[in-house]
Amino acid sequence: MRIYRAKTQCYQVDPEAIDPAVLELAAGTIRRGGLVAFPTETVYGLGANAQDAQAVGCIFAAKERPFFDPLIVHIASFEQLDEIAEDVPPLARRLGKAFWPGPLTMVLKRGRRIPENVSAGRESVAVRFPAHPIPQALIQAAGLPVAAPSANRFSRPSPATAQHVLEDLDGRVDVILDGGACPIGLESTVVDLLSDPPVILRPGGLALEVLQTIAPEITVRAAVYSEEEGAASPGMLLKHYSPRARLLMFEGEPGEVCRRMQAMAEVLAGQSQRVGVMVADEQAACFAGLPVQVQNLGSGERLEQVAANLFSAMRELDRQAVDVILAGTFSLEGLGLAIRDRLLRAAEGRIIQTG
């Protein structure tokens, strides 16, 4: 795969007062077939004209992303939905009315204006209406739907800041719109509405319990695709969101998880390995005095804090050049299901059950 190359320009953008000149520069880049990275309420996206197969191909080339991994098409109005998808079911409109703009992606029947490579050759298309003002303004100014996965190298932790985008894609994206940190910090929830009943393919920033207030029949897909099988949705491959360090995920009763992580940290440090730990604030004291790098993710009682800090913590431990990262899990309620999903994929399935 030939890598997409560009002279990257980064602009600070106030989401509440977007500079018209910067906005037009970014919109023109999209119209010309270039790549623009921008913040959303979830993570930074790497955008291109969703109706231009060559521009979409540049996304894959910049990220070194396999062509079997589909993209999400972003829109900025409800009217655009019918330009992207065909035979939109009533449930999609009910969910859109309830949760758009917001961190919900719906998998629908692909419309004829959307090239096959957006959807990895599938007859479906994933569509989202982001809540962040910068992508809304960019899509409106470009006059086009924008295909955008996360703005990182393939399989790396998703970018929650413009600096994360630069770390991965400097020289591979034309324009970066720096609108500050992304408030949710995890990707959108992807719901397949072509399944009966509808199924969550990727848990994310909109919790199952919230979705079920509108559609109680929605369930969660349990299976994990391997890389050979391809994926019906972005973010479904087993190796995904991965730091450079090897990550081990611990599950079980919180006190026992803390003890097992502490013991593992001592063993690894004794083998001259640099150890990083990602834990809730309440568990940080377990590692006091140990030769480990601790990243506090926030209170285990406030999973929105944990979600917002998760990918930044992985990147910071990579910056500190640790060899191994030990991570505990959290309640599966609310955002906890998405947090577990990201840790599972970052660990490439390496789970240590503590009983």
Image: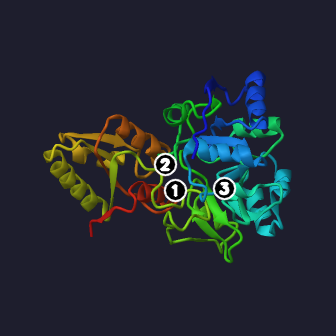
Q: Say if 320 sits above or below 63 in the image.
A: above
Residue 116 visible to the viewer: yes
Q: Are marks 2 and 1 in contact (CB under 8 Å)?
A: yes
The location of residue 318, given as percent across then percent down, is 36, 39
Amino acid type assigned to the residue bearing label 3 in the image: Leu
Q: Is residue 145 above or below residue 38?
A: below
Mark 2 sits on what residue?
Answer: 307
Mark 2 and mark 1: span between their CA atoms? 7 Å
Q: Pointer 1: residues within 10 angstroms few (<14), some, or many (20+)?
A: many
Which disc, if any, is residue 2?
none
Question: Please, which residue is most extreme toward the left here?
Answer: 270
> Going 21% across and 44% down the picture, which residue do you hit?
273
The residue carrying mark 3 is 104
Q: Position of residue 156 (x, y in %)?
A: 47, 46
Give residue 133's quadrant in the image. Answer: top right
Three-letter amino acid code at the position of disc 2: Ala
Q: CA distance from mark 3 to mark 2?
A: 16 Å
